[in-house]
Image (cartoon, grey):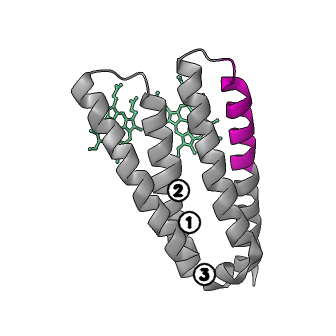
Amino acid sequence: MSKFFIRIAVLWMLAGILLGICMGISHQHLDKQLHVHGLLLGWVSCALFGLVHFAWPQLQAMLTARVHFWLHNLGLVALLAGLFMERRELALAGPFLGSGSITLAIATALFGWSVWRVTAK
Ligand code: HEM
Ligand code: HEM
């Protein structure tokens, strides 16, 4: 799982930086929140998850590691879609922001619980 977290982190970083460059060139910062959350929850958080799984390999054997990986990344995609729609005042923004945030919170709780269990031993 450590490998998958690091790999997806690099993809989020590339996407976030490309968006940052587009914003810089166009002087159009409408999607700044996508850039910020894609980079902080995508690149920074996933890279940290990867490093934590590397440092505590017991985490990788747990089913929660896979569930966390998918919930975090799918939740993030929904959050980014919601932020994109919110800026354009689209009606579906709310459901996407809500479901994305809750999914991310559940993923984080799962990760926290696993880390707590493994580090208690
Ligand atoms: C080539 C790389 C990057 C470019 C061209 C770029 C470009 C930008 C631009 C144009 C803004 C909008 C500034 C504004 O509206 O005031 C911004 C904001 C921001 N960027 Fe980047 N960025 C890059 C990399 C990164 C990375 C790697 C991170 C984090 C890991 C990051 C985090 C942020 C944050 C947190 C903000 C919001 C700052 C604020 O509103 O005060 N950026 N970036
Ligand atoms: C479910 C999780 C999250 C949700 C729903 C969320 C939502 C939001 C919202 C609504 C804003 C204000 C947007 C605006 O003023 O237009 C914001 C700003 C911000 N968030 Fe988050 N956020 C989340 C997680 C995070 C995390 C984990 C980080 C950092 C690791 C982060 C970093 C930031 C930063 C740096 C800003 C300010 C960006 C700016 O300069 O405008 N967020 N977030």
Residue at image position (45%, 67%) is 7
In the displayed orientation, state which residue is furthest to the top.
Answer: 89
Instruction: Give the overall secondary structure of the magenta segment.
Output: helix
Q: Which amino acid does label 3 sit on?
A: Trp
Could you tell me the amino acid type at mark 1? Phe
Give the class, few, some or many, for how many residues have Cα within 10 Å of label 3's Cα (few <14, many ≥20): few
Compared to 104, does 114 lie above or below?
below
Residue 39 percent across, percent down from the top left: 44, 47
Tell me where the magenta segment starts and ends, as one range: 91-105
Q: Are marks 1 and 3 in contact (CB under 8 Å)?
A: no
According to the picture, the residue beneath numbered tag 2 turns out to be 45
Q: Residue at 73% of width from left, 65% of height from top?
A: 67
Q: Name the residue under label 3.
A: 56
If you read the primary sequence from the N terminus, does the residue marked by circle 3 or circle 2 appear first?
2
- Quadrant for the N terminus, please: bottom right
State the image quarter where residue 95 is shown: top right
Q: Please, what is the three-letter code of the amino acid marked with disc 2?
A: Ser
Residue at mark 1 to residue at mark 2: CA–CA distance: 6 Å
Q: Which of 11 and 2 is in front in this view?
A: 11
CA distance separating discs 1 and 3: 11 Å
In front of the other: 59 or 34:
34
In this picture, is 97 found above or below 9? above
Q: Estimate the spatial distance between the alpha carbons at disc 3 and disc 2, rounded to whole Å.
A: 16 Å
**In this figure, which residue is indicated by the disc labeled 1?**
49
Ligand 1 appears in which quadrant?
top left
Are the residues flagged by discs 1 and 2 in contact, CB closer than 8 Å?
yes
Residue 53 at x, y = what percent? 58, 75
Ligand 2 contact, mark 2 (Cβ < 8 Å)? yes
Local crowd at mark 1 within 10 Å, few (<14), some, or many (≥20)? many
